[in-house]
Amino acid sequence: MQAATPSRQESLAFAIKLMRENRILDAERICRAWLEENPGCVGHLRLLGHSLIKQSRLEEAEEIVRFALSLEPGTPQLEEDMGSILALQKRHETAIPYLEQSIRHDPSRPQPYKKLGVALLAVGRGSEADDMFKGFLERDPGRNSVSTAIIHIQEGRTEEGQKLLRAALKEDPDNVDAMRYLASTLMTDKERLSDAEALLRRATQVAPDYADAWMMLGAALLERAKHTDAVGVFEQAVQLVPGNWDAWGRLAQAHALASQPEDAARCYARAVELKPDAPMVQIGYAHTLKTLGDQRGALAAYRAAIRCKQDFGEAYWSMANLKVFKFKDEEVEAMEYQLRERNISESAQIHIRFALGKACEDRGDYDKAWHYYDTGNKQQRILLEYNQAGLETRQEKIIEVFDRQFVTDQTGNGCKDPDPIFIVGLPRSGSTLVEQILASHSMVEGTSELPIMAKIASTIGRYRRDGMQYPEAVKDFRKLDWRAYGEQYMEESRRHRVTDKPFFTDKLPNNFSHVGLIHLVLPNAKVINTRRHPLDSCLGAYKQLFAQGQNFTYDEVELAEYYRSYHAVMKHWHEVLPGKVLDVHYEETVTDLEAQVRRILDHCGLPFEEQCLRFHETSRPVKTASSEQVRQPIYRDALGIWRRYEKHLGLWKKELADIIDELPETVRNAGL
């Protein structure tokens, strides 16, 4: 039996419902279907115009609303719509007459006054704009304070806006709009994020169906690194607006940050289905698929992101960052065109330069590859803050404080848990390979680069009245303090674990500075220092555009100085903690895998397992730049890569000569 044709009112009601659920394309489809049979229905024309505005298809919206006005001239709602469309196109002078007519034909409605005020302000007619804002507030007294505050905030007068919002909340503690907008101003200040979170939690309690408040609360939680909490919040948002692609994308992001890549991939897939032309959603989806080892899917999503945004440098670099991937000729040409012909952002330029460096290296053109890497690094360095002198001073203080006597006196006071295996060193020195070997063992869980120990170090002494901080502040530790910090590390690490295996890895390379602290708070933890020929190590870092941190890698001199500082610190730990740290050279692992695997497992007190030799078969999420490389069998192609760039590496060869001379012969001669 054929379904009954809906009435005009039923069709309109359904389309309005779809709009409220943010199912804009579905609403457009319903309106167009009705208008095919009833082309003069002004209600459907107006709603179609609204759906096009939501999609930023302003020229189409203007055409539709003009047609509706020709059918029913003098309709104030349509005149307001036309004014809105023109204003959104920055055609304020043309918008003003329509908004004036809308007010003239129906002076009771508040919104045209506000829109006219904004348009008048845009063309410099400030006093007239003030009259319109006054008219808006007079006709909508319930929103006076909030509306005025929003205008202040939009015009950059944040303090005035905050005062009005606080006044509104004093008068009406349940004013959820005031809570939301006040929270939005507080979120720009990292010191006030907890206040923003509190306001938004209150707003969602008062109005549990307020989707925008849930979305903003989730964003605040992500800013505070409360990733698991954010997952729950965004799940509430997608229940309220199941057709909102942004809500699904944010939920996916929260899952990814909470180390739940399978759930992230599922949510990104839904977001992409709802809005396939959103480049940031596509790249988030690609990153997640890369983490899961789905290189084909990741490449498809990266390329989809580039189709959405042709100068999307981050997507090009992300493809290059798969390491085992090679660009097509047309992709190289497209990148070169973007650099040569387009006025693209500095960030896009940097990402594309690093990507072109990889492309040229794959073609064997090492001089051109160095050019792109070098110019990309120089551009990136300008954008970053990095204090080499400050870092060296801090490393010297760590060496001074954690001397042999101090370490001996304090050993044994920490938390006795033997679970953590710390993998330290410099980036691009084989740490992901060692992690993958260990994570292939039945008793070891591979987590990721955990920021916990650095966070603990940064909090030591924070509230001392004399201002003394880490490392000097540890001199005043009581025995129970060492244990308390070890227990804090263990407690925070549980959030990053998903199995009940007895041991887990923490692969944050920069923890090399904190080996002394690690030993004293977790005396039974194991530490592995991954090493690689200094020239390969420096070159690998110089070829890498890091998502964040590692700011020392973008200048040749600073990189060499950092390497020397790292080498000095590790030499100190070997002297004061003999046997605590196992050095694992990448070159020796590649050339004699089984011997090195046995050394690694012996150091960690683990029985030998054959699966560790077949590490590439282990299926697990890997987030680092080497994610695809460790899913391949062991190969020697990366040994001695520095030799291909040797004529460009004079500075490093000179600055690191003495360290190179100390290396085992197998490391020095690798790649010959």
Image (cartoon, rainbow, N blue to C red):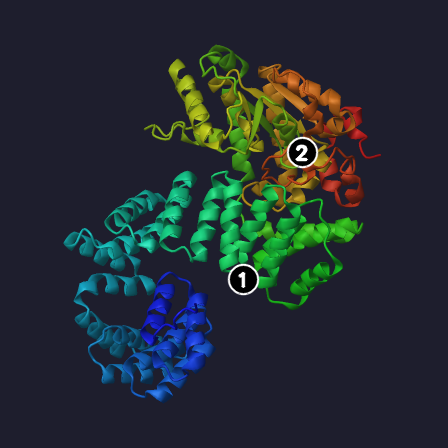
Left or right relative to 392: residue 227:
left
- Among the 4 quarters of the image, the one containing residue 117: bottom left
Q: Which residue is mark 1?
A: 277
The N terminus, quarter of image: bottom left
For residue 153, side relative to residue 542 (left or right): left
Q: Amino acid at mark 2?
A: Ser
Residue sitting farthest toward the right: 672
Q: Would you name the residue on which mark 2 appears?
A: 429
Seen in the picture, residue 235 relative to 450 is either above or below; the reply is below
Q: Is residue 494 above or below residue 359?
A: above
Dot 2: within a 10 Å radius of its alpha carbon, few (fewer than 14), some, or many (20 or more) residues?
A: many
- State the image coordinates of residue 610 (x, y, percent, origin top left): 70, 22
Tell me which numbered mark, 1 or 2, is placed earlier along the sequence. Answer: 1
Element type where label 1 sits in the image: loop
Which residue is at a point 35% across and 64% down the rendered structure image?
17
* Residue at 71% from the left image edge and 38% from the top image edge: 652
Name which quarter of the figure residue 631 lies in: top right
> Can residue 208 be seen here?
yes
Q: Look at the picture and state if 448 lies above or below 86.
A: above
Q: Residues within 10 Å of mark 1 (few under 14, many from 20)?
A: some
Instruction: Say which quarter of the image contains residue 413.
Output: top left
